[in-house]
Amino acid sequence: MSNRMPGSDGERPVIRERCGYRSPDGPVRLLTMLAVFGAILVTTAYSEPADRLVVYSGRAERLIKPVLDVFQAKTGIHIDLLSSGTTELVNRLQAEGVRTPADLFLTNDAGSLERARELGLLRPLPMREIERAVPAQFRAPDNSWVGLSGRFWIVAYNTTLVKPEEVKSILDLADPRWKDKVAIPNAGSEYLQAGVSVIKAVHGEERTRQFLQGLKTNAGTQVYGKSSQIVEAVAKGQVAVGLVNHYYIYRHLATQPQAPIAALMPDQSEGAMGAIMNVAGIGVVRHTRHLDSAKLLVEFLVSQAGQKMFADLDKEYPLHPEVKADPALPERRSFRAAMVPLARLAELREPTMALIEQVGLR
Amino acid sequence: MICAPLMYIVYLALSADSSVWSRLWNTRIPELLFNTVSLAVSVSAGTFVLGVSLAWLVVRYNFLGRQVWEWALVLPLAMPTYVLAYVYTYLLGAGGPVEQAWQIWAGPEGRVFSPHSYAGATLVMTLDTFPFVYLLTRAALLNFNLSYEEVARVCGASRLRRMLTVTLPLLRPAIVAGLSLVILYVVSDFGAVSLLRFQTFTYAVYQQITGRYDQTAAGVLSLLLVLFALIFLVIERWFRERSRFYQTTGRYRVPARKPCGPLGTGLITLYMVVVFGIAFGLPALLLIHWSVSAVAEGAVDVRFLGFMRNSVFLSGLAATFALLIGTPLAYLASRWPSRLNVLCLQAAYAGYVLPGPVGALALLVLFSHLAPFWYGTAVVLIVAYIVHFLPAGLQTMEPALQQVTPNLEEAARSLGLGPVRTFRETTLPLVQGGFVAAWVLMFLQCMKELPATLLLRPVGFDTLAVRVWLEASEEYYKLAAPSALLIVIMTLPALLLLVSKDWRAA
């Protein structure tokens, strides 16, 4: 412990440490060695073998790593995964430009992929395999990005607190009767941004603003960073309803079948908007140095086997017309999706962000 | 190099459109300001009570196991805030063990307060940071000149009066220093508030960086955060200048410790057990329990070795370079305190007011413009670490250098050694202890660092901290545990080494 007194500072420690004198070269040599060692590691870390792919992923690692592992086992191509936020990764790709180490970009939102395409970050892929497997509305016209699985932004409700007929439309959640009973994702969430874009395209700005204001009041502090946390909160009855992607509910039910939570497909009545759809997708980065391997991965993911695995792992809807969804999910044909083209999500995004910020969602 | 990030943030914020400012002002800023300030205030209050009372008991009383507690109370520092936060989201969360226990007593409708709240954030941050106050107060109490108290006693002052008018004011500098560490920690913390979803400036900056294409709003919030920290630092300096106390004699009696009866010992032990238990013991046990079951389920594989290597490698390199950069700065400023040299040293302290996400934001942009070749490599991350943690290292290096009297160096020079050999053979051996402490300190903080690592890590460079966060933020408690436990274990020996050398090190 420090026992240094004013006045006695100079001498005592000197004497003490003099006794413990060691070769002065020790620390110097150690430091130099560390520095050299570090420099070597930094440089070697970036000499990459050819059979390696770097995937920037905006999806939860748990949900895609198993599929990528299968691909790795099958082809021997090693995959390095950088899991992070989707938007953050778009920013990163843009900043890295031609020097990017990334070969592929995998996200949870078509709007972000389209944005990356507009920024010239992705590479068109004229591949028959893609065109055969994925319907045109789920990919970019030039296949710069390809949808891999469909998800719906819907209402999760606690079955002991809410009856399903209490909610008809997502817009109902802005009603004062849901005060302090709604959980929503934060404003940085790509699902929320895409969802609000669709609502705005269908219902117009004013109606959307009212909706967001109501939603903000009703949610209060129940603003979450992750959809899995919203589902958790609904299942535990901390809140009555929450806005999430459908698969989080089914994933929760798969591990805890007794949980009092269920999915509600909103806006299905005659003439209503339809459920808000988005896709998770992938694009090959324009400046990839491993185009052939990258194409192999895309091919694998759109193949029937890949589609089945990719969608089932996460309880999403496969986009390949011949691949069936997990039996736990409602039949895809039993409900309607909103008619807003996915590619428009990108252009709708900035005005949506402005609106979200004006309203002041966190 | 170190000031560039700060200047960039100022530039970014000032170049922002006024509509961005007004929008943020109308929506986010009041809430963030209120939350940040109130969290800082409540955590200060909590750490003050815990830190001072524990230090007082440990120094002034003699009870069974005193020496053990003296050490044990420092251990919470080994627990990164985000680890404690995630343990408490489990413990206090809906349906968690605390609620279940409470419901046995209060019936099935009983609820405990949510960890995702002001109270939760206060609890976690207090438990994690009270050792700062404890350590500094304890050091001050050990150096305390008892004569003042005795004089007061002779003059007939009551116990309470002595405490309030003599002891506490004399301890004030130490307490204030401890609290200011706490406040800086709270203001720049990202891990705990993000897991507890408590909106503070630092968290909001991170959300802006990760959620927006346009970074000006992040810049605006960053500037405010920097200003906030700066104002606080200035106030703290001013306060410290004003309340400088000198003890007049060079030698003290070791303060006598009051022996305690069995009842006193029991009460004190209970208090210590409770504080230590909730701040370190219980979380550590839970981590071990989770880790064991994660290993049993086969969730721990070779990849962990890689994460560990990344953590050690990045932190070691950053600490080493920070030491190499800090040495000339501190040396020049203490030997030739010219205006330029002192200015350089002061500038290095800028990192103090650049919380992780802010520094990361600035470095991302700076590197992409100025040194694009390094963008996305470990270099950026290491620079971020250096900028952020050099101040902490300098605080340990400076006093070490100042204690070496220039006479010794002059003697060496007059005996014919060149400047380099003088430094190597005279100065270095003398400051070795302080420098090792500085290295260890910076190494520890890099190991625990989260936001900058998340934003800047290169491909394939996930560290233990990143793994904890990735798993814990999805509420995979078990899977996050092995990494968290590893951080704690790797931090412990270094922490004990530091505390045994010098309190500042903590």
Image (cartoon, coloured by chain):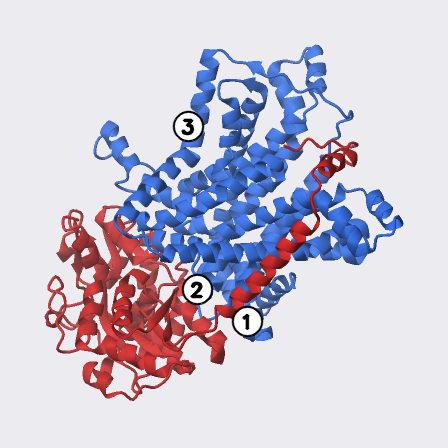
Chain colours: A red, B blue
How crowded pointer 2 is (Cα within 10 Å; few <14, some 14-19, many 20+) is rated as many
Residue denoted by label 2: B210
How crowded pointer 3 is (Cα within 10 Å; few <14, some 14-19, many 20+) is rated as some
Secondary structure state at the residue bearing disc 3: helix
Chain bearing tag 2 is B
User: In this picture, is B209 found above or below B285?
Assistant: below
All told, the count of numbered labels is 3
Discs 3 and 1 lie in a common subunit: yes
Residue at x-position 75% and y-position 41% = B403
The residue closer to the viewer here, B423 or B188, is B423
- The label nearer to you, 2 versus 1, is 1
The residue closer to the viewer here, A163 or A123, is A123
How crowded pointer 1 is (Cα within 10 Å; few <14, some 14-19, many 20+) is rated as some
Instruction: Check if mark 2's residue and mark 3's residue have beta carbons within 8 Å.
Output: no
Query: Residue B30, how many percent across, how many down?
Result: 49, 53
Query: Residue A334, how many percent across, how many down?
Result: 10, 69
- The label nearer to you, 3 versus 1, is 1
Residue at x-position 49% and y-position 78% = A99
- The label nearer to you, 2 versus 3, is 3
Residue denoted by label 1: B374
Residue denoted by label 3: B274
Q: Quadrant of the N terminus of chain A?
A: top right
Please state if B182 lies on the left or on the right of A26 as rendered: left
User: Going by the picture, which residue comes out furthest to the front?
Assistant: A23
Sequence-wise first label, 2 or 1: 2
The residue closer to the viewer here, A260 or A324, is A324
Q: Mark 3 belongs to which amino acid?
A: Val
Query: Residue B396, how many percent across, how many down?
Result: 66, 44
Secondary structure state at the residue bearing disc 2: helix
Sequence-wise first label, 2 or 3: 2
Secondary structure state at the residue bearing disc 1: helix
The residue closer to the viewer here, B353 or A327, is A327
